[in-house]
Amino acid sequence: MLSVQGITSHIGARPVLHGVSAQFQAGQLTGLLGPNGAGKSTLLRTMADVLTAAQGTVLLDGKPLAAFSARQKAQYLAYIPQGQEQVPPMSVREVVSLGRLPYRESTEGAAHHPAVTEALALTGLTELSDRKADQLSGGEHARLMLARALATQAPVLLADEVLAALDPAHALSVMHLFRAVAAQGRCIVLVIHDLLLATRFCDRLLVLQNGQVQLDGPPVALTQGMVQHVYGVSTRWIEGACVPWDIQPA
Ligand SMILES: Nc1ncnc2c1ncn2[C@@H]1O[C@H](COP(=O)(O)OP(=O)(O)OP(=O)(O)O)[C@@H](O)[C@H]1O
């Protein structure tokens, strides 16, 4: 559904990605892992067409991104950037309804579109629908951004560290939600630092280090040696999930 071929990126003179290639299938939840500065957000932004690579191609259903109009891309790709985005002084429901913009629905129609109501329910925001969006807590804001992305009904969802502000219950609920959304046939790429949740919930892990792919495979391929090599931490596997255990002595 979505693939990157030989992506090489520079930010200023600094090389960030070096010939990254990968394929992301419909119905698959991929965890994009790697240490701080590895290039995960840069790769995601390139796939979202926010950044243009110096070399390489991003293909959607086999066609280069450039072959799609801006509106087609907005209908096809939902992107949640890293960090807390400033939201307009609108209600939670109205901000989620902005996810319908690529379809040019009327403001009134969009606010009551079934996809908006469903996205609010799936992210546990129904009761906050009428609250001012700029008055939410960090975790509620993260779920709002996810709800707006889900309201697009885009077949590809690119999410950058959406779990960072979530408490354990909401983090688990969002991972279950991603699984359910992937089961509908959507393609999800999630930048994630939580090894336990990544190995427990993702179908596949793509691990970047210094702008290069270190691993592309199922969660079980993330061996203790690989984690030690990439992050410098020791791990234990508990019930099929990789748990960071201690920092390796330098
Ligand atoms: N606007 C920018 N100007 C200069 N350097 C940048 C810029 N954005 C990113 N970089 C650099 O590019 C490299 C990759 O950044 P990127 O945000 O892709 O990493 P990441 O893997 O997402 O990291 P993190 O886990 O910390 O979010 C880093 O060394 C970063 O400092």
Image (cartoon, rainbow, N blue to C red):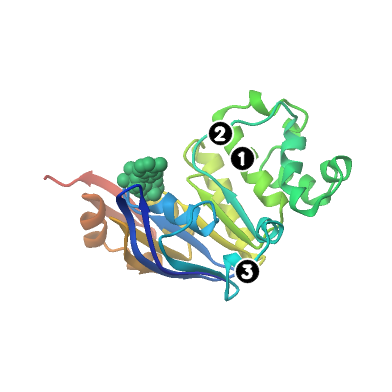
Q: What amino acid type is highlighted by mark number 3?
A: Ala
- Kindly tell me whether residue 193 is visible in this rendering: no
Which of the marked residues, 1 or 3, is nearer the chain's N terminus?
3
Q: Quadrant of the N terminus?
A: bottom right
Name the spot of residue 144 as percent of width and height, x first. Answer: 65, 38
- Residue at image coords 56%, 34%: 139
For disc 1, the neighbor class at 10 Å (few under 14, some 14 to 19, many from 20) is many
Residue under circle 3? 67
The total of numbered circles placed on residues is: 3
Mark 2 highlights which residue? 139
State yes or no: discs 2 and 1 in contact (Cβ < 8 Å): yes
Q: Position of residue 237 (x, y in %)?
A: 32, 57
Dividing the image into 4 quarters, which one contains the C terminus? top left
Front: mark 1 or 3: 3
> Residue 61, image x and y in percent?
60, 74
Q: Which mark is residue 47?
A: none
- Amino acid under disc 2: Gly
Compare marks 3 and 2 and give the one earlier in the sequence: 3
The picture quadrant where one finds residue 27 is bottom right
Q: Could you say which is closer to the camera, residue 59 or residue 170? A: 59
Closer-to-camera residue (120/93)? 93
**Residue under label 1:** 143
Label 1 residue SS: helix
Q: Is residue 127 visible?
A: yes
Judge left or right: residue 49 versus residue 212: right
Q: Quadrant location of ligand 1? A: top left
